[in-house]
Amino acid sequence: MTRFIGLMLLLGATASQAASFNTLQALSQEQFRQLSENVAAAAQFKGVTPPEPLGVIGFDIGLGVSYTTIEADEVFDIASEGDFDVAGLALPRLTVHKGLPFGIDVGVSASGAPGTDIKILGAEVRYAIMEGGVALPAIGIRASGSVVQGVDEMDMQNVGLDISASKGFLMLTPYAGIGVLRSTVTPNDAPDLEEETLSLTKMFAGVNLNLGLLNLTLEADKTGDYSTGSLKAGFRF
């Protein structure tokens, strides 16, 4: 996690990767699957928020960044003629969550990789099957989705389903969860490659610190073989 935080703080200096997978056709099917899994792990919806419901008048608004490791450097090199020369995918993100009646929260996000054409739109719906209290944790089920835009060489849609639990202690609310990510990745203008349908297990844990005027959330997740660290700052009330 220390590595992730340091890399996120250096985002402005390292976000120089190019988004053009202009040699996607040079990949084998197995390499295309590796590339798809890695990009899906980065592009899935990341709310970076505990499952504790916001309530009818509640909001969670934040700016953050996620950093996902690139595990197969050579695959990205082949697909982009060496343009991806960093160790991971850094994605700044704006997220907005709104509480609704009956323990339901909804959220939307917009993100993109600096210096690239990658843009990602996402949304989630979460239901608190247990809202939590002094002695009991909050438990929530979330359905989410995201779509990658701006990359002409391939189309990607991601849907996720997870369950998570949190328990607040004064200003701190740690949380953890497990789920599954299902992605459909379609190559364009690469006749030798076939569409990939992926199913990846996801585990995640984080901590929310609410200081009143400032809300900070730190989260780590492992989706398939790919690790992500996320940091978000904003307001939660």
Image (cartoon, rainbow, N blue to C red):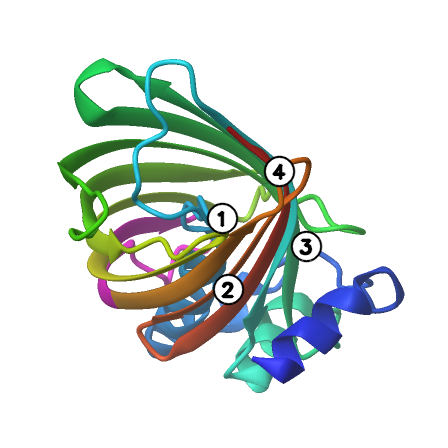
Q: Earlier in the sequence, mark 2 or mark 3?
A: 3
Quadrant where the N terminus sits is bottom right
Query: Which residue is denoted by mark 4 in the rendering?
Result: 212
Closer-to-camera residue (237/50): 237
Q: Residue at x 55, y 76 (%)?
A: 69
Q: Are marks 1 and 2 in contact (CB under 8 Å)?
A: yes
Closer-to-camera residue (190/178): 178
Q: Are marks 4 and 2 in contact (CB under 8 Å)?
A: no
Query: Which residue is denoted by mark 3 in the rendering?
Result: 20
C-alpha separation, residue under disc 1 versus residue under disc 2: 8 Å
C-alpha separation, residue under disc 4 versus residue under disc 2: 51 Å
Q: Is residue 125 above or below residue 120?
A: above
At label 1, counting other C-alpha atoms closer than 10 Å, the crowd grade (few under 14, some 14-19, many 20 or more) is some
| Residue type indicated by callout 2 | Gln
C-alpha separation, residue under disc 2 versus residue under disc 3: 13 Å
At label 2, counting other C-alpha atoms closer than 10 Å, the crowd grade (few under 14, some 14-19, many 20 or more) is some
| Residue type indicated by callout 1 | Asp
Q: Answer whether residue 84 is visible to the viewer in this image.
A: no
Q: Which residues are magenta?
A: 182-201
Q: Earlier in the sequence, mark 1 or mark 2?
A: 2
Q: Earlier in the sequence, mark 1 or mark 3?
A: 3
